Each structure stands twice: as structure tokens, then as C-alpha cells.
Image (cartoon, rainbow, N blue to C red):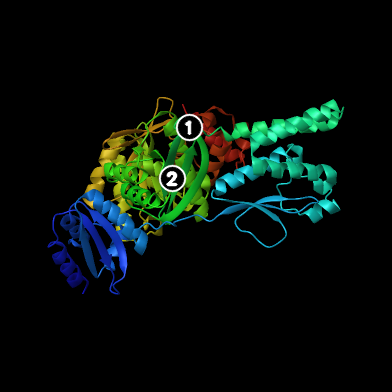
């Protein structure tokens, strides 16, 4: 049935004209599930239903639900884009990116005196409190409240006016010791002084920093003239705190007066679009949008930008973290809507590139927080995925290293990282069997060949799961050798090598195409270096253990020395050379030794 359906849809698609237009995919109930635009309708729609077409998971699910489609011809691809945006907004199809038309409003809640408290909230309640707002930006509200509370030393905790009136807390919190709270809960400030500070904070929130500083300065001067030096000093401290907070707000600023910065983060479950909005060169708002995971970053940016700016304010510049599909067409669409030239910029260096990197970090942090994972590891995995061109952050990473001494006792270690942290239950050891001594490339090829042999057998649980990324401790030679194994076994896992500098530190990642610099991407560099250090530690540990076992076996040739006594001797003296240099009395001090065995050991190393 599925084959008949796809055959019917493909036959219909091939009859479409090679003209610009919009196509509308529908399910068996006639409901619209996806709307797209195309420069050539026949080519684009046929791709969905063609035999053997490799689609991303989301597209496969969509195609599986398509029962029929309609189309609308347009005079140009730009006209098709305009119509696409309008139809998506009207119909809200399941498989298009869906964004809310407007954000909810935000307010500042101020409880009545005495001991007023100030909070950022999302809705008004009939509770007797004063509500300042509404405000469009949650970012602005939260920042303003944070500045007011710290500058006027008001509580940032969840204690209430009743707690402050009772003053039944024995010790003030850390904010008091940091000079950011007056600790009313402990009786460190009188009610009248607290109410004055709360009133000044509300005035600041209503009128802004400049007006509040001007008012406080006048009050400070009056207090000084009236010889109220203590009050004047407190007012001076408030003025300085407000000025200091205002300066901190300007830390994130841009030489571009008006722009939005957009960055993506992707996981195997969800994706996050982070947006920084700059107006007047200052960061005025930030938003996070959580959407279904994507397989095509360029298409994701296209869909997000066209949908978001169909119903939101458009800046003169949109700065993004990577290429966007139909970039010139999207610029034309935005410029048409704004009535002025709009540019889409992908910075490569300088201030703008740093701001994009900061936006990327925030996207990754918010995504990992949403998924309940560790933020640092999540950000590093997202950064590594972008660096290597992966469609999603690699949740499971395997890394391999070869260890030997001058070609002798060749072994390999395999370590596994899950969600950016070591998974020691998945570590494996390999004793090299067929590779020529000293040929690290052949040894690495043997190890990976054996690893995927085990995967095909399906007998060892430790090899049953395919990783999302394989790293080799080695350069292009190792990568090329293992790539041949992958081709023979038809393995489709991203493969890269980790290259060290002359000081044995991680320097770059290498692929069949060349090297990828690492140090400019801090989180990815740290993760890669950690993985390389861990696999080296594990492989060399196995190599040394094998060497000790080999040395220990030579000691068992001595009369009276079995494996237990051999191990005891090596633990006590460290090396065979040390055993060779000691006297019988020294050997007798080793646990388990007696005069007969001690003399046998001594005689073994001192035979003439």
C-alpha cells in the first residue's frame, strides 16, 4: 500500500510544471501538514516521493503521512516565499516551524509597605500589590529588578514582609556580606530606612537610572547641607551602586547600532534557537525558542527567519552563526517588509564573531538545561558538532589509541564518552595480533576492524551500540587506514583523528580532507583534549600492565617463585633491575618470602 501511495504521488509530482510556486502537503483527512516553496515545483516535490531518496527522520515521518498535495503557481520564487509565509501563518502546519505570534507580557510586582518586596512576574493578581508594566521583554524586566534590588540593598530571596517584621532569623545570608542586601530579616535595618530604600527602588524602576541618580544627588546635597552626614553617605552609596550597575549593563554592547544575533543548538531530541536583540548598540532583549530537532541547519535558519519576522520587528542587520538557505531571497523578503535594506551577515572574526559565539554558547546552555543535562558538557558537544559538521551533538563518542615500546607488546585502548563524560563501563582493551610491529596505522585498522566484527556478531553488549563519532589518537595516516576498513564494512560513522603538538598537547582534529583548528573553540578543545588524554592514559596503562605481567613471568622461572611472590617482588622493588641490585636481607623483607626463596632469587641474578 505504501509503495502504491508513493508511486501515485510521484507520478502526480512529475506532472507539475517547472515553475516557481508553493506546494501544500495533506494527510488522509485532508489536513495540511506542510507548506513549502520551490523555484521549480516538479523537481522539489518529486524529491519527497522518489524511490531510494534518503530523507532525514523528520522528513520521512512527514512523507509517511502525505496522502495528497496541492500547489499554487507564482510569477517568481520571491512571490512564492511571500505566499509560503502567509499560508504557514494561516494554517500552522504540523511539520513547519511554528512560532507564537506574540510573547506574553511581563510585570514588576511591588507589595504594599511596610517592608515592600519587589519581584518580576508574568501575570497580574488581585492581591493588593502594585504592578508596574506591562513590559514586552522578560529580559528587560528581570535585569531591571536585579539592578534595583542590588543597588538599593533589598532582599532577593523569597522571604515575606511578615518575616522582616518578625526579624526572627539569627544569621544574614551571603548577599548581606557581599553588600547586596540590608538583611531586614535579621533586624540589620530599621523599618523606616527599609521603606525609604524600597520607595527609591520603585522610583528607579518607573523613571529610569538617569532621573533616579539626579533625584538622589539632590537629596544627598540637601542632607550634607543640613549636616546629616550619615544619610548623605548612604545616598552617595546608592548613587555609586546605580552607576556601577549601569556600567555593567553596557558590558555586552555592539558597534552595530541595530541588529539581531541568531544562533542554533541541536540535540538528538530538540533544538534551540537563541536570539540576542541589540538596539542603540546595547543588548536590550534575548529569547530562546525550543523546536523539534533539525537535520539541515541552513533550512532551519531559513524557516525560522522567515516565520519569526513575518510578525515581529525587523532590524537592519541579522547576524547568524552559519549559512541560510536562499539567503539573497530572504534578504529581499525582509527588506520588502521593512521598507529598507536588510542584511544577513555571517561574521568570521572580530567583535561580531565573538558575539555570535556568545549567542551559540547560550543556545547550547539553554538546550542542555531544557533537556536536564549538564550545561558545560552540552555546550562542548554542540560546539564540537558544529566544528566537525555533524547534524547533531554526538551523545556517544568512542576514541582509540595504540601503545607499545619500540614495537613490542602492542596494545590498544578504547574509551567511551556519553553526553560528554567518561562511560567506563564501555572501555575495551585490545592486544594487537596481526599488524606488523611498529605499524601504528595497521594496528589501528586491525582494532577498528575487530570492533565492527563484534558489532556484526551482536554477542558482546559492549559493542552492540554504534557511536555517533569515532576519534583516533593519531593523524591522517591512521584516519586513512581506518577509512578503508569503514568502506569495506560499509560503516557510516563520522571519523576523525586527534593530532598533538611537539609538547604532546592536543593541537587539531584531522579528517581525510585536512586539519581543523581547535584552539579557537574553547569548549570543544577542552573536550577533545580530555578524551585524548583519557584514551592515552587507558591504553598506556594496559600496555604497562602487560609488560609487568611479562616481566613477572620471567621471575616465575626461579625455584619457589610463583605468580603471587613474583607480583609481591615487583610491587616492592618496582623493576627487575632493582631486584638485581638488592641483597638477600632486602629480599627477605618482602611479604611471603623465606630464606630459601630469597637466596634462590639472589642466586638467579648473580650467577657467574
Residue 183 shows in the view = no
Q: Residue at x 29, y 43 (%)?
A: 332
Choose between 525 and 12: the one closer to the eye. 12
Residue 158: percent from left, percent from top: 71, 53
Question: Left or right: where does residue 83 sit relative to residue 473?
Answer: left
Tell me the number on the disc at residue 381: 2
Closer to the eye: label 2 or 1: 1
**What SS does tag 1 mark?**
loop
- Which quadrant of the figure contains the N terminus? bottom left
Residue 343: percent from left, percent from top: 34, 37
Whichever of labels 2 and 1 marks the residue nearer the N terminus, that label is 1
**Compared to 403, does 304 lie above or below?**
below
Give the quarter of the image for residue 148.
top right
**Compared to 4, does 455 lie above or below?**
above
Question: Left or right: where does residue 464 sit relative to residue 118?
Answer: left
Residue 529: percent from left, percent from top: 45, 36
Give the quarter of the image for residue 234.
top right
Q: CA distance from mark 2 to mark 1?
A: 28 Å
Instruction: Report which residue position mark 1 lands on.
Output: 254
Instruction: For label 1, count other residues whose C-alpha is less than 10 Å away and answer few (under 14), some (14-19) or many (20+).
Output: some
Q: Residue at x 78, y 27 (%)?
A: 221
Residue 312: percent from left, percent from top: 43, 49
**What SS does tag 2 mark?**
helix
Amino acid at each position: 500500500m505504501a509503495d502504491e501511495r508513493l508511486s501515485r504521488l510521484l507520478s502526480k509530482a512529475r506532472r507539475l510544471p517547472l515553475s516557481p510556486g508553493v506546494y501544500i502537503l495533506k494527510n488522509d483527512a485532508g489536513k495540511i501538514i506542510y507548506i513549502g516553496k520551490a523555484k521549480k515545483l516538479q523537481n522539489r516535490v518529486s524529491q519527497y516521493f522518489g524511490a531510494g531518496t534518503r530523507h532525514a527522520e523528520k522528513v520521512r515521518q512527514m512523507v509517511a503521512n502525505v496522502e495528497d498535495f496541492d500547489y499554487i503557481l507564482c510569477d517568481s520564487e520571491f512571490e512564492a516565499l511571500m505566499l509560503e509565509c502567509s499560508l504557514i501563518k494561516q494554517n500552522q502546519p504540523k511539520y513547519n516551524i511554528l512560532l507564537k505570534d506574540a510573547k506574553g507580557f511581563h510585570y514588576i510586582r511591588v507589595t504594599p509597605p511596610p517592608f515592600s518586596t519587589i519581584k518580576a512576574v508574568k501575570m497580574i493578581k488581585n492581591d493588593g500589590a502594585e504592578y508596574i508594566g506591562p513590559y514586552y521583554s522578560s529580559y528587560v524586566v528581570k535585569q531591571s529588578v536585579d539592578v534595583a534590588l542590588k543597588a538599593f540593598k533589598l532582599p532577593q530571596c523569597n522571604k515575606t514582609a511578615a518575616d522582616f517584621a518578625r526579624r526572627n532569623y539569627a544569621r544574614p545570608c551571603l548577599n548581606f556580606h557581599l553588600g547586596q542586601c540590608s538583611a531586614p530579616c535579621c533586624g540589620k535595618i530599621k523599618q523606616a530606612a527599609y521603606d525609604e530604600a524600597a520607595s527609591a527602588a520603585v522610583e528607579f524602576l518607573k523613571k529610569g537610572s538617569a532621573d533616579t541618580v539626579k533625584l538622589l544627588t539632590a537629596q544627598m546635597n540637601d542632607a550634607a547641607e543640613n549636616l546629616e552626614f550619615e544619610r548623605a553617605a548612604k545616598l552617595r552609596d546608592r548613587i555609586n551602586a546605580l552607576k556601577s550597575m549601569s556600567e555593567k549593563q553596557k558590558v555586552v554592547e555592539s558597534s552595530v547600532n541595530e541588529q539581531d544575533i541568531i544562533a542554533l543548538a541541536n540535540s538528538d531530541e530538540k533544538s534551540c534557537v537563541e536570539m540576542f536583540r541589540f538596539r542603540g548598540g546595547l543588548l536590550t532583549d534575548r529569547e530562546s525558542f525550543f523546536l523539534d530537532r533539525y537535520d539541515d541547519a541552513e533550512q532551519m535558519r531559513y524557516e525560522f527567519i522567515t516565520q519569526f519576522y513575518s510578525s515581529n520587528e525587523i532590524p537592519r542587520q541579522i547576524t547568524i552563526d552559519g549559512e541560510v538557505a536562499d539567503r539573497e531571497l530572504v534578504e529581499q523578503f525582509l527588506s520588502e517588509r521593512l521598507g529598507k535594506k536588510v542584511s544577513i551577515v555571517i561574521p568570521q572574526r572580530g567583535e561580531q564573531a565573538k558575539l555570535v559565539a556568545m549567542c551559540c554558547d547560550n543556545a547550547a546552555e539553554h538546550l542542555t538545561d531544557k533537556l536536564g543535562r549538564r550545561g558545560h558538557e552540552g555546550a562542548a558537544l554542540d560546539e564540537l558538532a558544529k566544528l566537525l559538521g555533524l547534524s547533531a551533538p554526538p551523545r556517544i563518542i568512542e576514541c582509540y589509541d595504540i601503545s607499545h615500546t619500540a614495537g613490542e607488546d602492542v596494545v590498544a585502548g578504547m574509551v567511551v564518552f556519553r553526553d560528554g563524560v567518561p562511560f567506563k563501563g564501555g572501555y575495551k582493551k585490545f592486544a594487537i595480533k596481526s599488524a606488523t610491529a611498529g605499524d601504528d596505522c595497521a594496528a589501528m585498522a586491525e582494532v577498528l576492524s575487530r570492533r565492527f566484527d563484534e558489532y556484526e556478531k551482536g554477542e558482546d553488549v559492549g559493542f552492540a551500540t554504534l557511536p555517533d563519532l569515532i576519534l583516533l589518537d593519531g593523524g591522517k595516516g591512521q584516519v586513512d587506514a581506518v577509512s578503508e576498513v569503514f568502506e569495506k564494512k560499509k560503516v557510516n560513522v563520522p571519523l576523525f583523528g586527534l593530532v598533538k603538538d611537539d609538547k604532546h598537547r592536543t593541537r587539531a582534529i584531522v579528517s581525510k580532507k585536512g586539519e581543523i583548528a581547535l584552539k579557537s573553540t574553547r569548549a570543544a578543545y577542552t573536550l577533545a583534549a580530555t578524551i585524548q588524554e583519557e584514551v592515552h592514559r587507558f591504553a598506556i596503562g594496559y600496555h604497562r600492565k602487560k609488560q609487568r605481567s611479562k616481566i613477572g613471568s620471567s621471575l616465575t622461572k626461579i625455584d619457589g617463585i610463583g605468580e603471587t611472590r613474583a607480583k609481591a617482588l615487583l610491587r616492592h622493588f618496582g623493576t627487575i633491575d632493582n631486584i638485581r641490585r638488592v641483597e638477600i636481607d632486602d629480599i627477605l623483607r618482602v611479604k611471603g618470602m623465606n630464606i630459601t626463596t630469597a637466596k634462590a632469587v639472589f642466586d638467579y641474578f648473580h650467577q657467574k
